[in-house]
Image (cartoon, rainbow, N blue to C red):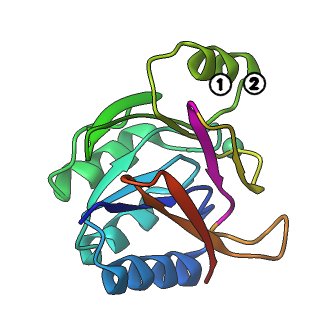
Protein backbone atom coordinates (compact mmCIF):
# COMPACT_ATOMS: atom_id res chain seq x y z
CA UNK A 1 0.00 0.00 0.00
CA UNK A 2 1.66 3.15 -1.20
CA UNK A 3 -1.02 5.60 -0.15
CA UNK A 4 -1.00 7.27 3.26
CA UNK A 5 -3.58 9.34 5.14
CA UNK A 6 -3.12 12.97 6.18
CA UNK A 7 -5.15 14.92 8.71
CA UNK A 8 -4.80 18.00 10.88
CA UNK A 9 -6.55 20.37 13.25
CA UNK A 10 -9.10 18.04 14.78
CA UNK A 11 -9.75 20.51 17.65
CA UNK A 12 -11.78 18.16 19.89
CA UNK A 13 -14.47 17.58 17.24
CA UNK A 14 -15.11 13.99 18.29
CA UNK A 15 -17.67 12.99 15.66
CA UNK A 16 -15.47 14.33 12.86
CA UNK A 17 -12.48 12.45 14.29
CA UNK A 18 -14.60 9.26 14.23
CA UNK A 19 -15.50 9.93 10.59
CA UNK A 20 -11.85 10.50 9.70
CA UNK A 21 -10.83 7.24 11.42
CA UNK A 22 -13.64 5.35 9.63
CA UNK A 23 -12.51 6.81 6.33
CA UNK A 24 -8.87 5.85 6.84
CA UNK A 25 -9.85 2.33 8.01
CA UNK A 26 -11.98 1.88 4.88
CA UNK A 27 -9.25 3.20 2.60
CA UNK A 28 -6.78 0.69 4.03
CA UNK A 29 -3.87 3.10 4.60
CA UNK A 30 -1.12 1.84 6.87
CA UNK A 31 0.12 5.23 8.04
CA UNK A 32 -1.76 8.36 9.03
CA UNK A 33 0.06 11.65 9.62
CA UNK A 34 -1.68 14.15 11.90
CA UNK A 35 -0.19 17.65 11.71
CA UNK A 36 -1.30 18.76 15.17
CA UNK A 37 -3.93 20.60 17.18
CA UNK A 38 -5.92 17.66 18.45
CA UNK A 39 -6.24 19.86 21.55
CA UNK A 40 -7.44 17.66 24.42
CA UNK A 41 -6.22 14.35 25.83
CA UNK A 42 -9.72 12.82 25.74
CA UNK A 43 -9.51 12.68 21.92
CA UNK A 44 -6.48 10.39 21.89
CA UNK A 45 -8.20 7.10 22.93
CA UNK A 46 -10.44 7.36 19.83
CA UNK A 47 -7.36 6.53 17.77
CA UNK A 48 -7.24 3.02 19.26
CA UNK A 49 -9.74 2.19 16.48
CA UNK A 50 -7.39 3.43 13.78
CA UNK A 51 -5.82 0.45 12.03
CA UNK A 52 -3.01 2.57 10.56
CA UNK A 53 0.05 3.67 12.50
CA UNK A 54 -0.53 7.24 13.70
CA UNK A 55 2.23 9.84 13.54
CA UNK A 56 1.44 12.96 15.53
CA UNK A 57 3.24 16.28 16.00
CA UNK A 58 2.28 19.04 18.45
CA UNK A 59 0.11 21.95 17.37
CA UNK A 60 -0.08 25.34 19.07
CA UNK A 61 -3.40 24.54 20.79
CA UNK A 62 -2.53 21.25 22.44
CA UNK A 63 -3.40 21.83 26.07
CA UNK A 64 -2.16 19.33 28.59
CA UNK A 65 0.83 17.86 26.78
CA UNK A 66 1.71 15.62 29.72
CA UNK A 67 -1.77 14.06 29.70
CA UNK A 68 -1.85 13.77 25.91
CA UNK A 69 1.55 12.06 26.00
CA UNK A 70 0.25 9.61 28.64
CA UNK A 71 -2.76 8.74 26.45
CA UNK A 72 -0.45 8.16 23.45
CA UNK A 73 1.69 5.87 25.60
CA UNK A 74 -1.43 3.78 26.35
CA UNK A 75 -1.79 3.30 22.58
CA UNK A 76 1.84 2.23 22.37
CA UNK A 77 2.85 5.45 20.63
CA UNK A 78 5.93 7.56 21.43
CA UNK A 79 5.76 11.06 22.96
CA UNK A 80 4.89 13.61 20.24
CA UNK A 81 7.51 16.09 19.06
CA UNK A 82 7.21 19.44 17.29
CA UNK A 83 8.68 17.98 14.12
CA UNK A 84 8.86 14.52 12.63
CA UNK A 85 11.03 13.39 9.75
CA UNK A 86 9.77 10.17 8.16
CA UNK A 87 10.69 7.90 5.30
CA UNK A 88 7.68 6.08 3.84
CA UNK A 89 7.45 4.38 0.48
CA UNK A 90 10.93 5.66 -0.30
CA UNK A 91 9.81 9.27 0.17
CA UNK A 92 11.27 11.66 2.69
CA UNK A 93 8.45 13.39 4.49
CA UNK A 94 8.52 16.28 6.96
CA UNK A 95 5.59 16.60 9.37
CA UNK A 96 5.03 19.78 11.35
CA UNK A 97 2.09 21.89 12.48
CA UNK A 98 3.27 25.03 10.69
CA UNK A 99 2.65 27.62 13.38
CA UNK A 100 5.60 29.71 12.21
CA UNK A 101 5.67 30.44 8.44
CA UNK A 102 9.44 31.03 8.46
CA UNK A 103 10.08 27.55 9.84
CA UNK A 104 7.80 25.97 7.21
CA UNK A 105 9.64 27.94 4.51
CA UNK A 106 13.03 26.81 5.82
CA UNK A 107 11.94 23.16 5.81
CA UNK A 108 10.51 23.52 2.28
CA UNK A 109 13.74 25.12 1.01
CA UNK A 110 16.06 22.70 2.81
CA UNK A 111 16.04 20.24 -0.08
CA UNK A 112 15.77 17.41 2.43
CA UNK A 113 12.19 16.37 1.69
CA UNK A 114 9.96 15.09 -1.10
CA UNK A 115 6.84 16.06 0.82
CA UNK A 116 6.15 18.59 3.58
CA UNK A 117 2.92 18.02 5.51
CA UNK A 118 1.64 20.91 7.60
CA UNK A 119 -1.62 22.19 9.07
CA UNK A 120 -2.52 25.20 11.22
CA UNK A 121 -4.21 27.41 8.61
CA UNK A 122 -7.24 25.07 8.46
CA UNK A 123 -7.20 25.50 4.67
CA UNK A 124 -6.74 22.46 2.43
CA UNK A 125 -3.96 23.33 0.03
CA UNK A 126 -1.48 21.52 -2.19
CA UNK A 127 1.44 23.47 -3.65
CA UNK A 128 4.89 22.92 -5.11
CA UNK A 129 6.50 19.89 -6.66
CA UNK A 130 9.85 19.44 -5.00
CA UNK A 131 8.88 19.29 -2.27
CA UNK A 132 5.17 18.84 -2.52
CA UNK A 133 3.61 20.90 0.29
CA UNK A 134 0.33 19.56 1.62
CA UNK A 135 -2.14 20.98 4.08
CA UNK A 136 -5.02 18.50 4.47
CA UNK A 137 -7.28 21.25 5.84
CA UNK A 138 -9.29 20.92 9.03
CA UNK A 139 -11.01 17.82 10.35
CA UNK A 140 -13.04 19.99 12.75
CA UNK A 141 -14.64 22.17 10.06
CA UNK A 142 -14.80 25.13 12.48
CA UNK A 143 -13.23 27.70 10.20
CA UNK A 144 -14.22 26.69 6.68
CA UNK A 145 -17.35 24.62 7.32
CA UNK A 146 -15.62 21.72 5.55
CA UNK A 147 -14.28 18.69 7.39
CA UNK A 148 -11.41 17.42 5.25
CA UNK A 149 -8.63 14.85 5.25
CA UNK A 150 -6.25 13.86 2.46
CA UNK A 151 -4.79 10.81 0.80
CA UNK A 152 -1.24 11.00 -0.50
CA UNK A 153 -0.09 8.60 -3.21
CA UNK A 154 3.62 8.17 -2.49
CA UNK A 155 4.43 6.74 -5.94
CA UNK A 156 2.89 9.47 -8.06
CA UNK A 157 3.11 12.15 -5.37
CA UNK A 158 -0.52 13.03 -5.91
CA UNK A 159 -2.89 14.29 -3.25
CA UNK A 160 -6.60 13.85 -3.00
CA UNK A 161 -8.52 16.09 -0.58
CA UNK A 162 -11.59 14.34 0.78
CA UNK A 163 -14.55 15.99 2.43
CA UNK A 164 -15.83 13.76 5.24
MN1 LIG B 1 -2.89 25.58 14.98
Residue 96 position within the rendered picture, expressed as x and y whole percent measured from the top left: 53, 34
Q: Is 163 left, or right, of 58 in this rendering?
A: right
Residue 31: quarter of image: bottom left
Query: Which residue sits at x=59%, y=49%?
Result: 37
Q: Pick out the residue farthest to the front.
A: 156
Q: Marks 1 and 2, Cα distance to the nearest angstrom? A: 5 Å
Residue 88 position within the rendered picture, expressed as x and y whole percent measured from the top left: 27, 44
Asked if marks 1 and 2 touch (Cβ < 8 Å), the reply is yes
How many C-alpha atoms fall within 10 Å of the one at disc 1: few (<14), some, or many (≥20)?
A: many
The quadrant the N terminus occupies is bottom left
Residue 12 position within the rendered picture, expressed as x and y whole percent measured from the top left: 59, 66
For residue 101, the mark is 2
Residue 135 position within the rendered picture, expressed as x and y whole percent measured from the top left: 65, 50
Q: Which residue is mark 1?
A: 104
Query: Which residue sits at x=54%, y=12%?
Result: 110
Q: Which residues are magenta?
A: 130-138
Quick one: 91 or 55, which is closer to the camera?
Answer: 91
Quick one: 152 or 31, which is closer to the camera?
Answer: 152
Specify the quarter for ligand 1.
Answer: top right
Secondary structure at numbered mark 2? helix
Amino acid sequence: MTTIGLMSDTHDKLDAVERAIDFFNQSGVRHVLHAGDLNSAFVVPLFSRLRARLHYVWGNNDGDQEMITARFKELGLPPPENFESLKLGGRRIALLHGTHPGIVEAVVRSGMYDVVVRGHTHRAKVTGRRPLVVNPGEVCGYLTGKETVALLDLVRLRVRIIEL
